[in-house]
């Protein structure tokens, strides 16, 4: 286990599946940033679209957008985070979503595998993510509290 994997596993253990119990506000001048990001991601979905979520944590966020896609792969360094993600997925009926231990700096996916790559809070490594994107693929990343999308 790498130091990063160990760190995120400890976070998952401490917060019981990456949930601190803290409340978040949904009062923002331009609307809820989470909903804005989800809406942005869903715009790029289709029954045949393939999504890679980098740094999925407990999976709740990617599961919210998964119905818009034909196939979803979600990676995280922490096996503890992914165990929590699997628990969330189990009751969702979203069998087209797979959670896998993976590193954003070397995803291991073949070239041109995905149509959309998302990263909410984790680091995104452009070289690794670009290699696994197909032609015209979109990146949706979290930037200063609002989602951004680019090709």
Image: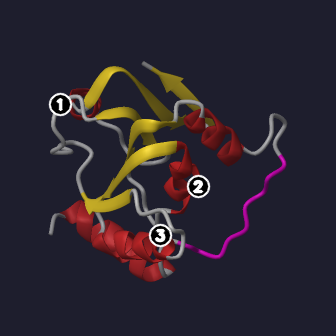
Corner quadrant of residue 51: top left
Q: CA distance from mark 1 to mark 2?
A: 26 Å
Left/right of residue 145 with respect to residue 100 in the rendered view: right
Q: CA distance from mark 3 to mark 1?
A: 27 Å
Magenta stretch in the rendered image: 19-27
In what element is the residue under mark 1?
loop
Q: Residue at x 25, y 70 (%)?
A: 6
Left/right of residue 33 with respect to residue 43 in the rendered view: right
Mark 1 Cα within 10 Å, few/some/many (few <14, many 20+)? Answer: few
Q: Residue at x 17, y 30 (%)?
A: 111
Mark 3 Cα within 10 Å, few/some/many (few <14, many 20+)? Answer: many
Give 149 or 69, whichever is nearer the viewer.
69
Please report contact status of discs 1 and 2: CB closer than 8 Å, yes or no: no
User: Looking at the image, is 21 positioned above or below residue 53?
Assistant: below
- Measuring from the top left, give residue 145's x and y in whole percent: 63, 40
Give the position of the C terminus as an image quadrant.
top left
Left/right of residue 147 with respect to residue 16 in the rendered view: right
- Measuring from the top left, give residue 73's x and y in whole percent: 34, 51
Give 66 or 107, whichever is nearer the viewer.
66
| Residue 100 within the magenta-colored segment of the rendering | no
Residue at mark 3 = 89
- Measuring from the top left, give residue 21's x and y in whole percent: 65, 76
Q: Does the magenta stretch mainly form a helix, a strand or a loop?
A: loop
Residue at mark 1 = 111
Residue 145 seen in render: no
N-term mark: 3 or 1: 3
N-term mark: 1 or 2: 2
Residue at mark 2 = 64
In what element is the residue under mark 3?
helix
């Amino acid at each position: 286990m790498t130091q990063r994997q160990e760190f995120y596993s400890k976070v998952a253990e401490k917060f019981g599946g990456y949930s601190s119990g803290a409340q978040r506000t949904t009062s923002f001048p331009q609307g809820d940033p989470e909903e804005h990001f989800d809406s942005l991601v869903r715009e790029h979905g289709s029954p045949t679209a393939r999504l890679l979520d980098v740094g999925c944590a407990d999976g709740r966020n990617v599961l919210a957008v998964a119905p818009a896609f034909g196939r979803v792969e979600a990676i995280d360094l922490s096996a503890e985070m992914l165990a929590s993600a699997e628990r969330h997925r189990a009751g969702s009926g979203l069998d087209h979503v797979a959670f896998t231990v993976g590193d954003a700096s070397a995803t291991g996916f073949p070239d041109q595998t995905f149509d959309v790559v998302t990263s909410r809070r984790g680091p995104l490594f452009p070289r690794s993510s670009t290699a696994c994107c197909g032609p015209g693929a979109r990146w949706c990343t979290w930037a200063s509290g609002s989602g951004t999308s680019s090709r």
